[in-house]
Image (cartoon, rainbow, N blue to C red):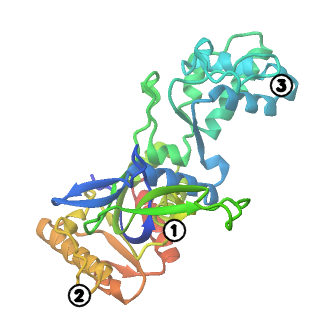
């Protein structure tokens, strides 16, 4: 059976930065091809992508991921039924307990989550991802059960929690250890971004001056410290299974919106680590999108041998040339030609990538990808 798979390949140069830190505060790295590379984890860029959705999609298309379910649901109950505001946390706790996502007796952070009546808002034992539609429906059920003098119905609540998934849940999936039958398989896979060249992390030694200090009489800085950083040209990759996305959403128009939002957000977002220190936000040097009907293909093998610092044509130019050559070779060797392909790029140094698809401004590329995905879904009806 024919599939619709969207592969996104990005080359992006980032100046001195610390986008994604490890437990010691150092920029994350990985060894690939025997060389140490800069790395930005898939989770970091997925978080940045999800955050970017706020400017691209309506609230109705999005969800909320939190442990503080009692607090969230209580606010919705009070909003839907202002007369029950004093009982909102108690009603929320009952619904969440019936659903099996929270046990009030084990709630934490009591000081932060107190209702006016002193009831502690329930928390789950792990982050739970629910769409706003699902949260609204659960709140409405809790209100209706209370007014009918009944306890919330766990089976009905589970049904409500498995309907009308948000775009972000449909894309990135949902895993609930206690309610595995309402898990959602992710439509998106995101690779760890790695630099196309070797890196050595550097240290910035900084000092801060105390404004009330008399420099003529008092010597020394008010504060000293170091921050670790590197700079890199990254190869980024993500793949989107449009058929899985459509199954998760159950709505072709929503799937088209989701494709448009994901391609836009993934390409233009950036993790926020140390951004105030480095002002490192850039846009990609090139975005290449390939729509396939067989399987996703990651082209990171183009950089198994590092791009060297003394490359006579510059790192980005060589990275673009390698990507164009490697992609063509892989697809020719394995007969994996894309159904359609598009390229958005900046400057002459990325000209080699024109061989990989139709050259378009980025906004037009995104529209073309979403329209083609929607057209293929329409043919499957």
Residue 312: assigned label: 2
Query: Looking at the picture, how far across and down is residue 25, in whole percent?
Result: 43, 49
Q: Is residue 252 above or below residue 279?
A: above
Pointer 1: residues within 10 angstroms few (<14), some, or many (20+)? Answer: some
Q: Is residue 255 visible?
A: no
Q: Which residue is mark 1?
A: 281
Q: Nearer the viewer, mark 2 or mark 3?
A: 2
Is residue 233 positioned above or below 110 on the image? Answer: below
Q: Point out residue 318 in the picture as x, y percentages from the top left corner.
A: 25, 80
Q: Quadrant of residue 211?
A: bottom right
- Expressed as whole percent of the image width and height from the top left, the position of residue 210 reads 67, 59
In the picture as drawn, the residue positioned furthest to the bottom comes out as 348
Decide which of tag 1 and tag 3 comes sooner along the chain. Answer: 3
* Displayed quadrant of residue 303: bottom left
Please state which of residues 259 and 108 is positioned toward the viewer in this rendering: 108
Label 1: element kind: loop
Element type where label 2 sits in the image: loop
Instruction: Indicate which disc, 2 or 3, sits on the residue closer to the N terminus.
Output: 3
Q: Is residue 209 left or right of residue 181?
A: right
- Within the image, what quadrant is residue 353 found in? bottom left
Side of 321 where 20 appears, left or right:
right
How busy is the neighbourhood of tag 2: few (under 14 within 10 Å), some, or many (20 plus)? few
- Percent of width and height locating residue 75: 75, 32
Q: Is residue 292 visible?
A: yes
Give me the residue at 73% from left, 18% from top. 91
């Amino acid at each position: 059976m024919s599939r619709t798979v969207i592969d996104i390949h990005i080359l992006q140069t980032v100046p001195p930065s610390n986008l994604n830190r490890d437990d010691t505060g150092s920029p994350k790295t990985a060894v690939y091809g025997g060389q140490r590379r800069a790395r930005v984890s898939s989770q970091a860029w997925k978080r940045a992508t999800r955050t970017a959705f706020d400017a691209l999609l309506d609230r109705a298309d999005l969800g909320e991921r939190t442990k503080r379910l009692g607090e969230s649901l209580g606010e919705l109950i009070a909003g839907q039924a202002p007369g029950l505001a004093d009982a909102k946390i108690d009603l929320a706790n009952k619904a969440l307990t019936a659903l099996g996502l929270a046990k009030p007796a084990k709630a934490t952070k009591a000081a932060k989550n107190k209702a006016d009546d002193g009831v502690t808002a329930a928390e789950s034992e792990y982050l739970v991802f629910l769409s706003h539609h699902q949260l609204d429906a659960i709140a409405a059920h809790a209100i209706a059960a209370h007014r009918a003098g009944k306890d919330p119905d766990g089976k009905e609540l589970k049904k409500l929690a498995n309907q009308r998934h948000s775009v972000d849940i449909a894309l990135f999936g949902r895993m609930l250890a206690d309610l595995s039958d309402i898990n959602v398989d992710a439509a998106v896979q995101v690779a760890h971004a790695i630099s196309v060249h070797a890196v050595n992390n550097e240290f910035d030694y900084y000092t801060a001056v105390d404004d009330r200090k008399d420099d003529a009489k008092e010597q020394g800085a008010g504060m000293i410290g170091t921050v670790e950083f590197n700079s890199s040209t990254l190869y980024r990759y993500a793949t989107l299974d449009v058929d899985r996305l459509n199954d998760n959403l159950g709505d072709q128009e929503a799937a088209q919106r989701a494709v448009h939002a994901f391609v836009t957000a993934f390409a233009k977002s950036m993790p926020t680590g140390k951004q105030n220190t480095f002002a490192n936000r850039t846009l990609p040097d090139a975005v290449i999108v390939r729509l396939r009907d067989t399987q996703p293909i990651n082209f990171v093998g183009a950089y198994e041998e590092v791009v060297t610092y003394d490359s006579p044509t510059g790192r980005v130019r060589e990275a673009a040339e390698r990507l164009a050559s490697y992609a063509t070779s892989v697809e020719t060797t394995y007969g994996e030609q894309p159904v359609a392909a598009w390229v958005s790029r900046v400057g002459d140094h990325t000209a080699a990538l024109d061989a990989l698809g139709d050259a378009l401004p980025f906004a037009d590329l995104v529209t073309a990808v979403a329209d083609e995905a929607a057209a293929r879904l329409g043919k499957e009806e």
